[in-house]
Amino acid sequence: MHSGKSDIIFRIIMTNNPSRPRVEIVGSFLPPEELEAAIERRKAGTISDLEFHEIEDSVIDRLIDREIEAGLKIVTDGEMRRKAWDRDFWEGLIGVERDRIDSGALWQDEPVRRDILRFNGKIAFNPEHPFFEKFVHLTALAGKRAEVRQTIPSPGELYVRMVMSGNGDLSKIYESPQSLLDDIIEAYRLTIAELYRLGCRHIQLDSSVWGRICDDDFQRTLLLGGLDPEHITATLIMLINASVKDRPADLEVTLSIAADETRIPRWDNSTEQTNLRRMFDEVDADAFLLPFDINSPAQLEQLSAFPSGKRAILGLVDGSMAGLESLTDIVNAIRIASRHIAADQISISPTCGFKVRNRERQGLNYETQWSKIELLNRAADAFAPDEPSV
């Protein structure tokens, strides 16, 4: 249910409160039934591509309006068009294509008989990357009502995917392993520059690797393949920093570190603490999207190491589950964070995108996500720091 006129006026008043956190989203939204039905019809061959894309465009057009009505200042297309959160972007680069595989491998992280990435030459910037046209469409829809954030997988995500696909031997899948890092950096650097030219001022780099680099099983997999997790971590940092180096001052780069829709970083684990603090200190991002478990408020004390001048987007409601969190717990979490970070540098968000793998099992529907956003707005309205911000 949309807010009434009095609620809208109240929200405008509260938004002018400098201590009120901004409400943000991770990026993806669950599709409405209309789009889901169109997807099934397309698979069955009972709808043309033109008809499908008309429905898809209509759904995204309405989504932008609803995001703005919900008070979001930075919007996305909900990643409604995506087939995979990472491959869709990579397949738009030169030298990358989608293929099928019918046999497994030691490190095969894709189920067999599924689409996978194939590398058919040097990875390079594509001036006709499909994301460019989609971004222009979104900015036209949003107009001056909101800014648009473009979400893309982190460059380190592509590197690790290639390492895993080659079972540790990049020469098996890439013609010039010695130039791979430079090729990835240049492709990302030019892509980000073109998005900026088209008007993008908010880039979000999504990384599942940051959320699991300290996981014992993942580290064991790397070590069995002769890879040093410490070296991988250093490479992840280098790839991000080199890809965004010398960016314009008004381009905000956000790093999202959720490993998947259910995993929260182990903020109380000493190894993970060290890795997260290294990320804070060394990654050249302007903002970090950090998921927390509000049932363990002590986790937020780790923000004592958060760098000054950076924005913290705190994931405080579970975007993968239907149940609503406690308003009091969310407000308390913001209050704890505000003891370590200036109030005007704090935003709040879901812990992950809403587009989850098994929405039926997890009890989600199209309206659930809006209930979560409304809960965050209520928490933002209710928040007042209990002591001066740092």
Image (cartoon, grey):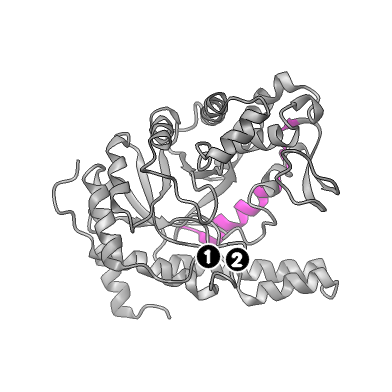
Q: Secondary structure at mark 2?
A: helix
Q: CA distance from mark 1 to mark 2?
A: 6 Å
Going by the image, does 309 lie left or right of 211? left
Q: Residue drawn 58% across and 40% down? A: 217
Q: Residue drawn 69% across and 47% down? A: 87
Going by the image, does 251 lie left or right of 169? left
Q: Does residue 136 belong to the magenta stretch?
A: yes
* Amino acid type for the residue under numbered disc 2: Ile
Quarter of the image with the C terminus is: top left
Q: Does residue 262 belong to the magenta stretch?
A: no
The part of the chain drawn in magenta is 123-144
Q: Which residue is mark 1?
A: 64
Q: Secondary structure at mark 1?
A: helix
Q: Is residue 158 above or below residue 146?
A: above
Q: Residues within 10 Å of mark 2 (few under 14, many from 20)?
A: many
Q: Is residue 288 above or below residue 137?
A: above
Picture quadrant of residue 207:
top right
Q: Residue furthest left?
A: 387
Residue 305: where, in percent of width, then height? 30, 35
Quarter of the image with the N terminus is: bottom left
Q: Which mark is residue 196?
A: none
Q: Is residue 356 above or below residue 123?
A: below
Is residue 70 among the parts visible in the rendering? Answer: no
Residue 195: where, in percent of width, then height? 59, 42
Q: Which residue is mark 2?
A: 60
